[in-house]
Image: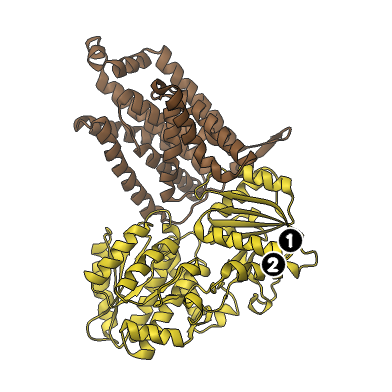
Chain colours: A brown, B yellow
């Protein structure tokens, strides 16, 4: 369930970007790791609480997101091309991370790492609980914002029919910049959660792409609650597979679920 | 120092370094450089360990050039980045031979890439000394020379060494759980351990396999806790051992005796939950290993260079030692034969033993493997110490029980 929450958090920016901005932005995975490394650096070198590092990292990532969208808009990057361009960006960010922190493993040691409590027979580790709480809170907040606020409605309208939304006075450029900034900020949050629970290495950026894509597709593109729900379904299914059968079957779960969904309800993925 | 890394942004800086280094080297050497070509996984999932091999190669080439180079000529090491991709390693070795026209080859990092390089070396009849090949039976080329002294059948020999160590304990384990990654070079060792355990009468209470790249070790840790084995064999490579220990810690489970096949040495030794964790080794930073000629100096040089490169763990163990030994073997063959001819070098290596920092290596067994020099090490007081066999143990060290 906890790993599923992380899938959801990682997929949140991707699903919004894909569904509303029509950009399949792989660079969010790289930004997540960049945020994780920054969290590691600020915590170990400066002694800042890992969660407090978000106050420094998040605004910076919002600016990065805005800048990315500005570039995409400036060069009219199509959805398919966005996949290629952001893959290139991912490789560049990976190289930057490697040149600064080397390819060797980095582990953030913090008070959160050892904190845990018991609920009956269940063990609840603090970092994973924080991830779950943030994932639920952000998914619900974004769901509510998109559904009930004027800005959210404008975003949905722009995604549905851009020219028509513009005719009604929606500033599509501003909306796209803001949403891209928010998506990049979500990557920063995911990065801090990742740093709390996992040992970091630059090449691990790619290890998450497959399963998070599956969560995004299963959850429905552009739906803020989708990746969280699908992520938890995948995470729980993987854990059950590992607990009851051979752990080596677990990686089959996410894609089997995806194929099943495509077969049963092809319009939903 | 004369080292060329291909395709990196550091070329300009390296150019300066090469000129400066070459001028220093020229004091003792003359003539055109002896060019040694290799690839390393400088990027990609294997980069964290390949970095160790890069540092070792740089140290060795620098030391060579400070002495007399090879045959009185300076040595130039051409390193290309195979991006942790065996198929790219194949292309790059072809390029090293046909385009860069290197005189000698050095192996890449890890079994897959070495197997690729071996095919190319065989096609051009080049000697391939390599340091990290994990499945000896796959090495069919007669001019390949391994310096990771696994012996020809490590899946049988090493588990016996480990189980001997455990059997010598006051309360030897009676039950075993084997949990293993399906990464080829650890998987075959785990299957070997399973067979050996059976023959030695250890009762298997759990056997699990996971795919390399698994992220969630919680369910595996929970099944281990339920199985309550006296001894856990973890067929882990890289971070997997730490991930399993992390997951075990979260459910308050600490295995009694626990062994990890090829753990990431830094993260493992630094993790509090890894207390008394066992692993395999061919070299550690203590006597008797550091009594071998050149070993202590190398350890010191590696510490300095690794710290300068920003590595969080700067210790010398299996990877660095196997790598250094590979360069020692290549140098010994060239110096002994006064030749760069691959046929002559291969013939000499097959007939002679070479002194290395891990001990004497021979290449006259099946697949050119010699003795299994793998020992058992353990995390004790925050450092790795060799504990078995007794003649290789650190002074005063013995296997610590639960």
Kindly give the residue lying farthest to the top in the view shown: A168
Q: Are marks 2 and 1 in contact (CB under 8 Å)?
A: yes
Horizontal and vertical percent for residue B56?
A: 42, 71
Circle 2 residues within 10 Å: few <14, some 14–19, many ≥20: some
In the displayed structure image, the side of residue B170 where residue B234 appears, left or right: left
Subunit of mark 2? B
Residue sitting at 34 percent across and 86 percent down?
B344
Label whose residue precedes the other's in the sequence (2 or 1): 2
The quarter of the displayed image where residue B79 is located: bottom left
Horizontal and vertical percent for residue B379?
A: 64, 63
Residue sitting at 64 percent across and 65 percent down?
B378
Instruction: Tell me if residue B105 can be seen.
Output: yes
Nearer the viewer's eye, disc 2 or disc 1? 1
Of residues B337 and B30, the one drawn nearer to the viewer in this rendering: B337
Residue sitting at 38 percent across and 50 percent down?
A97
Residue sitting at 32 percent across and 76 percent down?
B126
Residue underneath mark 2: B163
Against B249, is A3 above or below? above
Looking at the rendered structure, the secondary structure element under dot 1 is: loop
Kindly give the residue lying farthest to the left in the view shown: A75
Looking at the rendered structure, the secondary structure element under dot 2 is: helix
Residue underneath mark 1: B202
Assign the N terminus of chain A to one quadrant of the image: top right
Horizontal and vertical percent for residue B202?
A: 74, 61
């Amino acid at each position: 369930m906890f790993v599923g929450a992380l899938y959801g958090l990682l997929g949140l920016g991707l699903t919004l970007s894909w569904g509303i901005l029509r950009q399949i932005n792989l660079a969010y995975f790289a930004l997540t790791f960049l945020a994780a490394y920054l969290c590691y650096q600020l915590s170990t070198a400066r002694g800042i609480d890992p969660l407090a590092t978000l106050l420094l990292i998040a605004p910076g990532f919002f600016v990065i997101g805005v800048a990315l969208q500005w570039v995409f808009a400036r060069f009219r990057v199509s959805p398919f091309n966005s996949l290629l361009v952001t893959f290139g960006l991912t490789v560049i960010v990976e190289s930057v991370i490697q040149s600064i922190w080397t390819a060797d493993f980095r582990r953030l040691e913090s008070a959160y790492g050892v904190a845990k409590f018991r609920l009956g027979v269940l063990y609840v580790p603090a970092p994973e609980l924080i991830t779950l709480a943030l994932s639920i809170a952000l998914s619900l907040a974004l769901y509510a914002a998109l559904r009930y606020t004027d800005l959210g409605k404008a975003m949905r309208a722009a995604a549905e029919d851009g020219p028509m939304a513009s005719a009604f006075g929606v500033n599509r450029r501003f909306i796209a910049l803001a949403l891209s900034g928010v998506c990049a900020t979500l990557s920063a949050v995911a990065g801090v959660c990742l740093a709390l629970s996992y040992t970091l290495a630059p090449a691990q950026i790619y290890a998450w792409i497959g399963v998070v894509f599956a969560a995004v597709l299963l959850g429905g593109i552009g739906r803020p609650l989708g990746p969280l729900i699908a992520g938890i379904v995948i995470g729980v299914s993987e854990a059950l597979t590992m607990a009851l059968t051979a752990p080596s079957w677990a990686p089959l779960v996410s894609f089997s679920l995806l194929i099943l969904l495509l077969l049963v309800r092809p319009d939903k993925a | 120092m004369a080292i060329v890394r291909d395709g990196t942004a550091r070329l300009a800086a390296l150019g300066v370094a090469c000129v400066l280094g070459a001028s220093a080297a020229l004091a003792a050497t003359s003539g055109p450089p002896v060019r040694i070509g290799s690839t390393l996984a400088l990027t990609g999932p294997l980069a964290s360990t390949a970095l160790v091999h890069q540092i070792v190669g740089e140290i060795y080439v620098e030391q060579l050039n400070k002495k007399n180079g090879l045959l009185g000529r300076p040595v130039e090491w051409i390193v290309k980045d195979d991006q942790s991709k065996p198929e790219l390693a194949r292309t790059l070795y072809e390029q090293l031979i046909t385009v860069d026209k290197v005189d000698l080859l050095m192996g890449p990092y890890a079994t897959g890439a070495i197997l690729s390089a071996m095919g190319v070396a065989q096609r051009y009849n080049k000697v391939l000394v390599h340091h990290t090949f994990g499945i000896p039976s796959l090495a069919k080329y007669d001019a390949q020379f391994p310096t990771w002294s696994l012996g020809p059948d490590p899946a049988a020999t090493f588990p016996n060494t480990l189980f001997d160590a455990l059997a010598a304990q006051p309360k030897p384990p009676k039950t075993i759980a084997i949990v293993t990654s399906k990464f080829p070079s650890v998987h075959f060792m785990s299957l070997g351990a399973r067979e050996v355990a059976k023959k030695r009468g250890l009762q298997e209470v759990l056997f699990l396999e996971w795919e390399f790249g698994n992220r969630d070790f919680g369910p595996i840790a929970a099944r281990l806790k339920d199985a309550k084995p006296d001894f856990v064999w973890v067929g882990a490579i890289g971070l997997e051992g730490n991930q399993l220990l992390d997951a075990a810690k979260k459910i308050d489970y600490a295995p009694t005796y626990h062994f990890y096949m090829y753990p990431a040495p830094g993260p493992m030794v630094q993790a509090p939950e890894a207390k008394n964790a066992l692993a395999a080794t061919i070299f550690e930073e203590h006597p008797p290993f550091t009594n071998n000629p050149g070993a202590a100096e190398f350890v010191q040089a590696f510490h300095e260079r690794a710290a300068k490169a920003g590595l969080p763990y700067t210790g010398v163990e299996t990877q660095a030692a196997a790598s250094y030994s590979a360069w020692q073997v290549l140098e010994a063959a060239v110096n002994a034969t006064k030749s760069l001819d691959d046929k002559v070098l291969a013939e000499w290596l097959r007939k002679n033993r070479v002194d290395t920092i891990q001990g004497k290596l021979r290449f006259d067994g099946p697949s050119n493997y010699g003795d299994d020099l793998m020992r058992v090490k353990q995390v004790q007081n925050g450092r790795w110490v060799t504990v078995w066999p007794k003649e290789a143990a650190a002074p005063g060290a013995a296997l610590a029980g639960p």
